[in-house]
Amino acid sequence: MPVHPSLTGTEKKHWWLSNRKLVDKYIKDARTLIATQEQNDIVSALNLLDAALALSPRYEVALELKARSLLCLRRFRDVADMLQDYIPSLKLASEDSGSASADNSSTQLSRERVKLLSSNNSSSDSWDRDPSFKCFSVSDLKKKVMAGLCRNCEKEGQWRYLVLGQGCFHLGLMEDAMVLLQTGKRLATAAFRRESICWSDDSFSLANFPLASDISAAGVTASNQSPANAIVIPSRSVTELESVSQLLAHIKLLLRRRAAALAALDAGLYSEAIRHFSKIVDGRRGAPQGFLAECYMHRASAYRSAGRIAEAIADCNRTLALEPSCIQALDTRASLLETVRCLPDCLHDLEHLKLLYNAILRDRKLPGPAWKRHNVRYREIPGKLCALTTKIQQLKQRVASGETANVDYYALIGLRRGCSRSELERAHLLLCLKHKPDKSTSFIDRCDFADDRDLDSIKDRAKMSALLLYRLIQKGYSSVMTNIMEEEAAEKHRKKAAAALQAAQAAIQVQQSQTNHEPNQPPKTTSDKKQPTTPPANVFQGVFCRDLAAVGNLLSQVGFNRPLPVKYEALSC
């Protein structure tokens, strides 16, 4: 990086001339590097812009080029840190943490005066208001004079809306992004209309319009023409406004779906809330990291209210993978683990939460940058820490008494006591398909990260938490299946005993019925059964005498040598 000779003291020149020329040279070289749209060239241009801002801290052109370079490099956190005083919701955040420390009082007082566009009198010098002589530093005078020389009051601040709005979107500050982009689009359109009035018919040519297709390079390719041409080239391209319109439509869609989901959650329609949140997190178009973490946290609350403990724990795991310092996710997951009586894991989360509370009290501020949103206020931390310490002591006493093995796996899987084998297998299959460790990082593909350097750590956290949940589900399946098998064996044994008792009762009833059927008959002996049954004597005697009489009559009529008729032969036989 080139260093001006006046900074080293080797050469003495008039600083208001040498610094201005050096700043212009840095800006010119930075424009050339940014126009290539190469990452390395943009990084080099960013170094040049930092050098220019070191000489002229309030040079508006350098500030705009630096902000757009950071946006092109996807360093959205740096964009928000650079322009955090222009974020609309930062005033509320500063009021919530107003009692954090006295050291930050001056910064908080400055943030309370949030202005999206700085006024022309914002940089007025103290010696302008007070004509009396005052002692002041020469370096401060240089900064003020250079700021007054390099400022462009007409264009100042308008670029902050579009650049900061895009940065807020990627950071998950959806409401701020919508307000900033809408305002920037309106101002850019109005400026374009005002400038178009001054154009002549011959000025509408392709050479007068920027051809950059990227948003970050839209304001860089504008040429600086002399006033004699009477042609004003717009600093915002039509392509940028179209991209902003598409981004605004996407932001409004996400906010509408989140509003519908939160309304259903407040109304007790948990299935409807889960459906709306699932549309957001499973959408085809990605969403910012912070916004997705918030939606996962709300869906975990809906799953918890619906009694689906495993799904709620999984959403808490995803939230903590995206936002490791999310207090609400840690508290909710600890409560869920305590519900199913998984006390060791619950204690682990509570200890982590206690460390986070202690770090907040030590640093006297909430974790993360000033523009980051939290669901807890700083003044609530001491009371929460006392309650958390008491709860940790109670859980340690329960663990010492031997409650570690009494886990309610039925509540974890979402089954009733006494469920069947088919119900268990169906619930286990669905849980395995949803929470398989191989698919634990699939949600990362639909996430727009504020910094790609965090991707590896996010994947590691997601895999570890998903593996722990999967092992807990498998252990619960084995435990519940063992109980079901024992109940089936006991039921089979009861059925066999009931069948034997029923057969014995049936035999007794048959014997009693046979006894009741012949009550007055004496029992038969063996001699009675062997005696043959003979017909009455008078019946056979009558038939025999009638046959003899017929035979005697025939013999007397015809003699002994006369043949008998056929019927009598048969009768005699």
Image: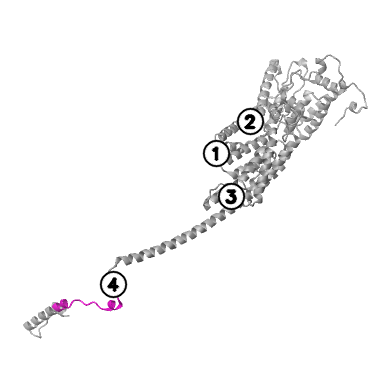
- Say what amino acid the circle numbered 4 marks: Pro
- Residue under numbered circle 3: 409
Whether label 2 touches label 4, CB < 8 Å: no
Q: Nearer the viewer, mark 3 or mark 1?
A: 3
Residue that appears at 72% across and 42% down: 457
- Distance between mark 2 and mark 3 Cα atoms: 41 Å
The magenta span reads 525-543
Q: Nearer the viewer, residue 284 or 169?
A: 169
**Left or right, 409 with reference to 106:** left
Secondary structure beneath label 3: helix
Q: Nearer the viewer, residue 248 or 98?
A: 98
Secondary structure beneath label 1: helix
Task: Name the spot of residue 493 as percent of width and height, x first.
Answer: 49, 60
Secondary structure beneath label 4: loop
Task: Name the spot of residue 184 as percent of width and height, x first.
Answer: 68, 24
Task: Name the spot of residue 401 as percent of width and height, x first.
Answer: 64, 51
Q: Nearer the viewer, mark 1 or mark 4?
A: 4
Q: Nearer the viewer, mark 1 or mark 2?
A: 1
- Say what amino acid the circle numbered 3 marks: Tyr
Mark 2 or mark 1, which is nearer the start of the sequence?
2
- Residue under numbered circle 1: 271
Whether label 2 touches label 3, CB < 8 Å: no
- Residue under numbered circle 2: 251
Residue at the outermost left position:
557
- Distance between mark 4 and mark 3 Cα atoms: 69 Å
Of the 4 image quadrants, the one containing the C terminus is bottom left
The correct choice, above or below, for 139 with respect to 424 in the image is above
- Distance between mark 3 and mark 1 Cα atoms: 23 Å
